[in-house]
Image (cartoon, coloured by chain):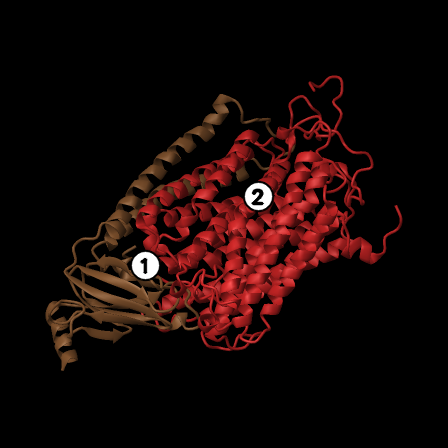
Chain colours: A red, B brown
Amino acid sequence: MTEQNFWQKYIFSTDHKIIGMQYMFTGMIMALIGGYFAYTFRMQLAFPGTEVFGFGTVSPHEYNSLVTNHGTIMIFWVAMPVLLATFGNFLIPLMIGCDDMVFPRLNRLSYQVFLLSAIVLVASFFVAGGGFGGAWTAYPPLSAQAKYNMTQYGATLWLIAVALEFVAFLLGGINFITTLMNSRAKGMKMYDIPIVLWMIVLASILFMASVGPLIAGAIMLLFDQTLGTGFFDPAQGGDPILWQHLFWFFGHPEVYVVLLPAMGIVAEIITVFSRKKLFAYKTVLYTAFATGVLSFFVWAHHQFIAGIDPRMANVFAVTTLLISIPIAEMLFVYIATLYGGSIRLTAAMLFALSFLAAFLIGGVTGIFLGASGADIYFHDTYFVVAHFHYTFFPIAILAVFAGLYYWFPKMFGRHMSETLGKIHFWGTFIPFNLIFLPLFFLGAAGQHRRIYSYELFSELNSADFQNLRVLATVALIVMLIFQLPFLYNFFASMLRGKVATANPWQANTLEWAAPSPPPHGNFATLPEVYRPPYEYSVPGRESDFWPQHEKPSGESKA
Amino acid sequence: MDLIIEQASSFAADIDMVILLIAVLAGFWFFLAEAVLFYFIFKFRQRKGVKAQYITGTRKEEKKWLHWPHNLIIVCDLVIIFFAIKVWYDIKQDLPPAQEVVQVIGRQWSWQFVHPGLDKQLGTADDVATVDELRVKVGVTYHFKLESRDVLHSFSVPVFRLKQDAVPGRVFTGWFTPTKTGTYDIQCAEMCGMGHGLMQGRLVIEDEAAHDEWLRNKAT
């Protein structure tokens, strides 16, 4: 192979690892923007009307735009690229023992479209009228007509950015699915595939099956905005609630699109760091399938009080509560996996365990919202905000950090500092709880979302409630400050960290058979697979791990 | 719940009962799971010379640790579903006959209310229209006719535990029976544009004499 110059190697690369890292760095930059937005509007909520350091005073118009784009960025430009695209791209070829994705150029195109979508979104903040402020769900007629939302250009650019992002993930998703199905190493059977890959591919299937209606809806909304059509305009015979169905038919499976890869990452990490076989591998797989299928039948629980036929709510309350069963079972499997283990609390393991502890809160609070009768009260309150942050934060932040600390040696051939990692962990996990536990309480007290100041509402304007808002804001600032050790650790370790061996964690899966970092093409000779991925602490063996690619010797039962 | 926020409608206590039920059932599983998780983390820390056990989780006596919680959670879910749907049905599907009807109209960015006059009939000459103030009589069962003039709004009265989106082009009918007098917040619970945070209304619940007095003053 001829030597590649910088542009070929890092910018227009078709190497799955480089593309994964492009997604990762873009996602990190977007996370900083999303975090900055959160800081700004939390400051406004804690200290209404005062000048926010680094922003200035926040007008109601700007507040709406900040909230809207915080949500949009964190889901579409952080959770999706980091969980699906970064880990999917980096891990799939390595963990199935092949040299690259089956469609490397499609993969490159996927990132380029994604980058374009991010640029369009960021551009939308700077056009006349400012960024779109009609909530990340973009319900028409507010989102459809400039006379209502007052962000003529911002709304259209926002919509185009979201649509482009979907295109990027469609291109990436088909690549993930095809690669996993066609390029597995010799001997790797269906039940030998590591859980994380199953999860990423299931998530891609869910995404591809659910996003079609929303892309159609986005085009209709774009026409409503720019051509004056009336798909969602009741005055012209359209129906605003139609958008909600199209949005949530995608929007709820989307939750599981990001949840499943996070669950997969956690499965890899807790098995390695407790030196245990995954408890009931097939059960995990079946619960993931069940979750995926059920996730297509729960969307209208977002619309209980939106004006749908009230009889329909009964059906969706049943399906929504049923989906708690496979998710609960998956969590039980993970907890059971710890039983009898030999647990090493590395930074990666701490993040993975905190994912379980925090996601449990997100899960049980979801029951309140899925139960139609209780949702009449909780709908659109801060209870909902706290609930989904207790799902999305573990997914997009805790699981991602777990994955980064775990696979960093493979990505860059060096170790991150464990001490800084643990400081980062506690500095993230404790403030996280202090941000969102008060919000459960405020939500239960009737505080609604997306309101830029509660001074007008006598029931919500008490000093006690305001103290809780200040507590959440201060905790957020503390948490943001504790990301500095991470950023330092990440970049300094990339250059000067302790050099990593090929398999520093003594793990079983195939990515650890490649050198750290793996060169273009990954493996010197493609590995073969002889056993399932989680054969840790097998009785009668000297070492407590047994890599998938290790040839069976005479005495062991192959 | 009533410790955090007052109950001022006939169905507020029913909704709070469902919330309490879920809190007990889901809370039980939550604390159990967290307790087991933390116990395992502390109990099975790495110790010198102790190897992890090899458990596949496929044998029957191992799987029962999944099956039992699985089945019990189904039972809990069914209980929750039953009560959630019962309360939902009473509030949203099975409307009791109305003694009076009020009209509620959301627009960017205020609430408009049309009250029936002393004749207790909506749509007559003595109707009283107000902005951002809804006045109702304690103990009277009202139907409300909810409309929107522009974008989506959501008529939310936390002390009633009542919420319903308003959709342009449609009229939704709902009901409430106030159970105590007082003055409370009305919020808009659906993002409706720049002034969404300003869309605050007041709910005044009063006895019949005070209400009639108010109507008479409005008429003159």
Residue to which mark 2 is pinned: A203
Which circle marks residue A425 in the picture? Answer: none
* Quadrant of image for the N terminus of chain B: bottom left
In the picture as drawn, the residue positioned furthest to the bottom comes out as B220
Q: Amino acid at mark 1?
A: Gln
Q: Which mark is residue B164?
A: 1
Give the x, y percent position of residue A366: 42, 48
* Above/below status of B156 relative to A403: below
Q: Is residue B133 above or below residue A202?
A: below
Residue drawn 38% across and 66% down?
Answer: A235
Characterize the local packing of mark 2: few (<14), some (14-19) or many (20 or more) Cα atoms within 10 angstroms: many
Q: Amino acid at mark 2?
A: Ala
Q: Which is nearer the eye, A8 or A373?
A: A8
Q: Which picture quadrant has residue B166?
A: bottom left
Whole-percent x, y for residue A467 in the image: 41, 67
Residue at mark 1: chain: B
In the image, residue A43 sits, relative to residue B143, either above or below, namely below
In what element is the residue under mark 2?
A: helix
Quarter of the image where one finds residue B48: top right
Tell me which chain the residue with mark 2 is part of. Answer: A
Q: Residues within 10 Å of mark 1 (few under 14, many from 20)?
A: many
